[in-house]
Image: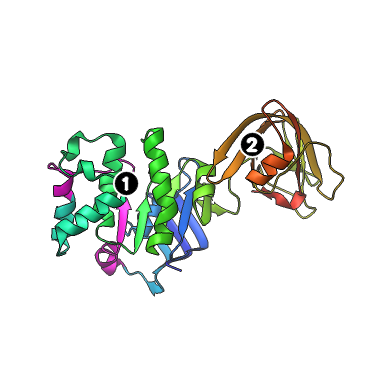
Amino acid sequence: MIYQFNNLQFYYADKLALSLDQVTIEQGKTTALIGANGSGKSTLLNLCAFLASPQQGELFFNGSPVKLSDLITYRRRVGFLAQKPFMLCGTVFDNIDLALRIHGKKQRAEKIQRVLRQLDIEHCAGQQAKQLSGGELQKSALARMLVLEPEVLLLDEPFSYLDQSSAQSLELFLRRYAQAVGQTLVFSTHDRLQGFALADEVLALAQGKRVHSPLINLFTGVVREHVFYSGAMRINLPEGVVSGHHASINPQDIVLSTEALVSSMRNCMQGRIVMIAEEGGSILVNVDTGVIFQVLITYQSLRELNIHLGDKIWLNFKSNSVVIF
């Protein structure tokens, strides 16, 4: 593991922003942080970037406890890309070259050309950084970090200000990065399905705490006698669940069928298909049952089901697939 958080708490003034009992982030993998605004994603990234330190608890990096006196040393080992990256006056080449010079790196021109080629922005080398488009700015700032070969790459909402073409290009890069380079990548996103599709691991946060749910198919309601009620919808729960105000069902745990199934799955409901789209190597099917359910299936399942927009379809999932919190 590259990060380990034990009984960690972080406050803004007297308000608790993050509380993690025990959380680890694996080395050499891509981890997505998902959750609503205010859930603690940016705070966790700041801690991972050593831009802040917890008021309580322990933070370990690569097996060693992180001390307040060592934060600057650790900062040099990670690369952090903010939502709105800042570039200095001058060209893209100048910005990347300055980062290399500050760190005392040699063969700078060769390294700059290689990283620009890697991100497909060689044409930006001589452009003024302040005049770049949103996608070019994001990639140029990313190049400035990658050229330093950080042990960990941290990206805060990297897709927020990108057009569709730039977002797709960045998605492709993220899919390849950890596998090709063997380094750790952690990014936050509002798009929960996107995080689920791109990452090896997903860390979901709600109100500053980790929840063991992808936060997709998320509903608000009440639990009564092992049933979750949300409006007119009823979801059967395992017998041990007696309280909670939120229910979430993993989109990969939902089975689609063209007819009602006879099975051990206790939750079955019929709806109408309102969207079919590609999503990170899988097929996303949105089904309207009175509320919208998002379901991820394989290309093979799509062919076997032979479903189309407007078709009626059955949703089936087990009671223990429902996460209550």
What element does badge 1 sit on?
loop
Classify residue 302 as left or right of residue 80: right
| Amino acid of disc 2 | Val
Crowding at dot 1, Cα within 10 Å, few <14 / some 14-19 / many 20+, comes out as some
Crowding at dot 2, Cα within 10 Å, few <14 / some 14-19 / many 20+, comes out as many
Q: Residue at x 52, y 57 (%)?
A: 201
Q: Residue 285, which numbered label? A: 2
Q: Is residue 294 above or below residue 318?
A: above
Residue 115, image quadrant: bottom left
User: Label 1: which residue?
Assistant: 82
Closer to the camera: disc 1 or disc 2? Answer: 2
Q: Is residue 109 above or below residue 288?
A: below
From the viewer's side, name the closer residue of 126 and 60: 126
- Within the magenta stretch, is there residue 304? no
Name the outermost residue toward the right.
262
**In the rendering, at what x and y percent does residue 206 appear?**
53, 47
Classify residue 136 as left or right of residue 259: left
Q: Residue 232, which numbered label? A: none
| Magenta span | 68-95
**In the rendering, at what x and y percent does residue 171 appear?**
43, 45
Residue 153, image quadrant: bottom left
Q: Residue at x 45, y 52 (%)?
A: 175
Q: Number of numbered discs present?
A: 2
Q: Earlier in the sequence, mark 1 or mark 2?
A: 1
**In the rendering, at what x and y percent does residue 272 appear?**
72, 28
| Amino acid of disc 1 | Ala
Name the outermost residue toward the bottom.
64
CA distance separating discs 1 and 2:
32 Å
Residue 270, image quadrant: top right
Classify residue 222 as left or right of residue 126: right
